[in-house]
Amino acid sequence: MPVRPLLPLWGALLAAAAGGVALDASFPSLGIWPLAFPAVALSLVSLIGRRAWSAFLVGVVFAAAFYFPHISWADTFLGDDPFAWAPWVALASVESLLHGAGAILIALAYRWIPGVRDTAAIRALVLPAVVAAIWTWRETTLGSWPYGGFAWGRIAMTQSESPLARVTSWVGVSGLTFLMVLVCALLVEAARLAVRAPAPRRAWLVAAPIVTAAVLLAVPQFPTTPVGSISVGAVQGNGPAAYMDARAPFDVLNAQIAASAPLREQDVDVVLWPEGGVDSDPLYNAGTARVLDELVDAYGAPLLMNAASARGGDPTSPAVPIYNTSMLWTGVGEPQLHSKRHPVPFGEYVPDRPFFEALAPDLIGLIQREYTPGDDSPVFEVGAARVGLAICFDVISDGLIGEGIGDGAEVFMFQTNNADFRGSDENLQQLAFARMRAIETGRSVVNLSTTGTSQIIAADGETLDALPIDEAGLMVADVELRDGTTAGVAIAPAVDVAMLLGLVALVLAGILARRRGRA
């Protein structure tokens, strides 16, 4: 029997738009995490029974209603330039179009899966699982493609303040997305089937979503083992660190030094500065290196800092690659180095620059810096402790976080520079991702921004200390070290591969449904 749309097209468009707005509200700054569930449900309901072009349109509307407000902070990157809105509109538009293409696959699942065998069990159990797998596959794919992808809208990341955050320690971020969409799809199918099912059968139809939701709420966090602590002095300098800020040489460094002054009277194991906290290359500039040597001696502790670096070459030479580099500066010997693994396209480099310069020469010409991706370990040895790193947007990379755990990270220190996005929700959204990483890995996290918001987060997600946005300040704390790999980190790559089974099921269902139709 052909699947008819649950809603007329105009109704589906309204439902999709409402779902997109609700999904944005589930992220910070509003952070109303329960809204993620009706948001997903509205998206699914709007796609049921749709053919390809209407599914694409509905999917684009859902995504546009989400992405345009969700990443409105992208229009602040270029400051007061008259084209400052262009990166925001371009990114939100591309993500909406790609999301709409993925919506076609979900609509086809609602058509083809029942077309193979239209039974209550298939509709109530198999169909929701396939739909959830396709949704999750779309999410992970758009998080890695094109140009490294944009994973800022992952459904699971809405839950950093909810009891469901603990689930990531068992199944990872993609696994939680799958389970959240599964609950929504199960409820949608239960409601559809209950309309025409006899009263005695309605109870079992709702059992699957209720049991699944109850298990997710009850699951404890995967255990890890405390192995000591490290005393950290984390400094938010609030210097003029935005790409378009007017500043003199060393203004950012001087702001960090001023905010760090109390550490001369403190006893800490490491001093942590944020991304871009040093605005010259100490591996090339001997004067900057001498200043850092003096600071390390004054603090009595190594300095974990970050700068744009040519790794000892001449940073003014176009032939020398520049890296967004974290360094453990000890004043003795060569520093340990880790460079940002995934520079941001159209922010930290321009892919296919000749092509895009031909399209928008004035706009692309504003982006002069070109960072090269790093390939070194994201873990530093700080005394007896092993510190995992992620620079700014690298916090969203499952692979890098897993690599840090594999290399022995006992605590994570995330360095970021949110100065480009002052006055927006971006820093709170990124902070939520950092909190989710703490819970997922069972590790404490120090999330330090140049301008805020900065926090020290316990392994269970509790905030231990915080610095507000746009204020210079200092956090000093004994941060717990932990050992052990959570199930969520261990199986995260396998979960992403498993989501391909949804596409396999969709293709097989399409072939079988077509053959059955011909017969």
Image (cartoon, rainbow, N blue to C red):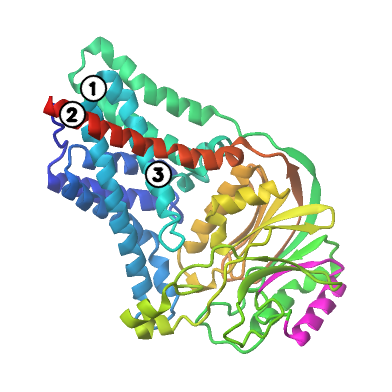
Q: Badge 1 local density, few (<14 within 10 Å), some, or many (20+)?
A: some
Q: Does 480 appear above or below 389?
A: above
The residue tagged 1 is 117
Q: Residue 127 location in percent, x, y?
A: 31, 29
- Between discs 3 and 1, the one toward the N terminus: 1
Residue receiving disc 3: 137
| Residue 12 showing in the rendered view | yes
Secondary structure under badge 2?
helix
Query: Which residues make up the magenta segment?
Result: 284-307
Classed neighbour count for the residue bearing mark 2: other residues with Cα under 10 Å, few (<14), some (14–19), many (≥20):
few
Q: Is residue 255 above or below residue 517?
A: below
Q: Earlier in the sequence, mark 1 or mark 2?
A: 1
Q: Amino acid at mark 3?
A: Trp
Q: Nearer the viewer, mark 1 or mark 2?
A: 2
Q: Is residue 27 left or right of residue 101?
A: right
Cα separation, mark 3 vs mark 1, equals: 24 Å
Residue 64, picture quadrant? bottom left
The quadrant of the rendering that contains the C terminus is: top left
Instruction: Give the percent coordinates (x, y) of residue 158.
Output: 46, 47
Q: Quadrant of the N terminus?
A: top left
For label 2, the residue is: 515
SS at mark 3 in the image: helix
Query: For the point 40% across and 24% down, which residue is it?
Result: 210
Identified by mark 1, the residue type is Arg
Q: Mark 3 or mark 2: which comes first in sequence?
A: 3
